[in-house]
Amino acid sequence: MPYALREALAAFRRTPVLTGLSSAMVALALFVTGLFGLATHNIRRAIEQVEQRVEIVAYIRDDAGRAEVAVAEDEIRALPEVLEVRYFSKDDALEVARRELPEFQEILAGVDVNPLPASMEIQLRPGSRTQENVSALVARMSAYPFVEEVRYGREWLDKVFLMRRVGAAAAGVLGSGFAVAGVLIVGTAVRIAIFARREEIQVMRLVGARDSFIRGPFLLEGLLTGLMGSLGAAALTYVTYVTVRYSLFNVAWIPGAWVGGGIAVGALLGVLASLISVRRYLEGA
Amino acid sequence: MIKLTNVSKEYPRRGLALTDVSFHVRKGEFVFLTGHSGAGKTSTLRLIHMAERPTSGEVRVSGFSSERTRDSEIWKLRRKVGFVFQDFRLLPHRTASENVAFALEVTGAPRREVRMRVQRLLTQVGLSAKAEAYVHELSGGEQQRVAIARALATEPLVLLADEPTGNLDEFATRGIIDLFRDINRLGMVVVTATHDLGLVRSYPDARVMEMKEGTIVYDSARLE
């Protein structure tokens, strides 16, 4: 076993409480980040699902001619942000109502005149479902003389867009906040580890060990601490995910790339923090 | 081997510690550096070990110059210049042989050689019987012997000792200085800083340099 690894492992053995505590602190910092990742991922999924349902419905006057509606339909369909345009005649609407609203079946069966209007349903392409596009399309639809009313769940949609903006801002602020906290905690843990081994460092410098050799075990220790911490954090996050999923509500697990990235970031933070601490100590010694 | 030329050292708060110090120690010499505390003995040793750089003048040690040696190369000098302290500076919670092995391992000695060389070094300082004793189980004199074995691990050309017997009784003190003499007879330069004039007098063939207020006020080599 190479010297650096042997010494790094020996440090864990000599001061198990200290290194355990360091790893636990790293785990805690990354666990908070992991929880946030879990929340962010699920909010994003929820928003995507809601966005898929962004739909504009134009109700058409009973006196409108089918031909002029068909022309408008083609115009709308030609727009780049539009994914699909579907026309529902009065009969279609009645049939859907009969099928999907069984409790009204008797009432609907009894009427001679169909009270439901014909309608045009427009779906936007994913990525074009912005507030601006929706507003522009609503304005355009309203301008057709045969359109009675345009509905698009205005308040609801506005809330979704707001939620997404707040979500992005919160992710930025909290994410970077926790990253800074993580670096500080790892850095402190490594500084404590270096302090615990300051006598060894002094002896190494005294007898003529190379600086890179002196750094080696500490960098490895930082790497292992970061790695253990981030694995612990991943495990804690997973336990939380399972608990929420089976006792509260259905959530999705974070994508594998996020987990891998998080573990790599934890290991990297460990190395970086110990690099800074060791360099500072060696310059000061 | 060691050459100081017009060396001065000034500390930001303490002021001038050394003023225009010049001397030359040749291969095979055995030197006592004497003087009261604060006379500049420790500063001189630290400059030779390049733990510090002179404010002016030049320190040359075995081909390394204080003017040209970069910080990143000082480890090379340290392997040629061993150092022992009054307070030993051993690693606690380790045995005598582990302390010596540590110095060998961190300076890149091949692993299969470490055990054998540790044994040889501890035998050289007369401590082979206590190789597996922990530091706290050893007497002061024995601890200093471990520190000397550690300093010899890199097979240096020079051994510097800063008040190495300051914490030892008379008997242990004689043992340590006798050990230094043995090491010196093998060809190594030994420079021992001490304020113990009685000790210095009992080695009449040693070169003695006396320091006072940061200058060399007496050098037995200059009288010859």
Image (cartoon, rainbow, N blue to C red):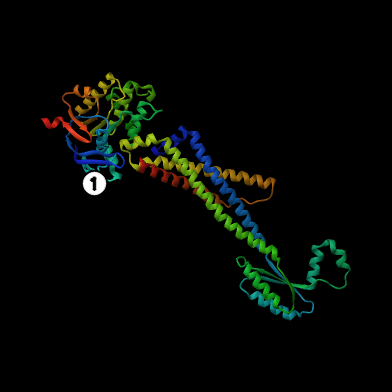
Give the percent coordinates (x, y) of residue B158. Answer: 23, 33
Q: Quadrant of the N terminus of chain A?
A: top left
Q: Position of A261 compared to B49: left or right?
A: right
**Badge 1 amino acid:** Arg
Looking at this view, name the residue that lies furthest to the top.
Answer: B171
Q: What is the total number of numbered labels drawn onto the structure image?
A: 1
Give the percent coordinates (x, y) of residue A59. Answer: 75, 73
Q: Can residue A171 be spotted in the picture? A: yes
Q: Residues within 10 Å of mark 1 (few under 14, many from 20)?
A: few
* Up/down of B197 relative to A98, above or below: above
Residue under the image location 63 percent in, 55 percent down:
A43
Give the percent coordinates (x, y) of residue A105. Answer: 85, 64
Q: Position of A70 compared to A13: left or right?
A: right
Q: Quadrant of residue A234?
A: top right
Q: Which residue is mark 1?
A: B68
Give the percent coordinates (x, y) of residue A141. Answer: 69, 75
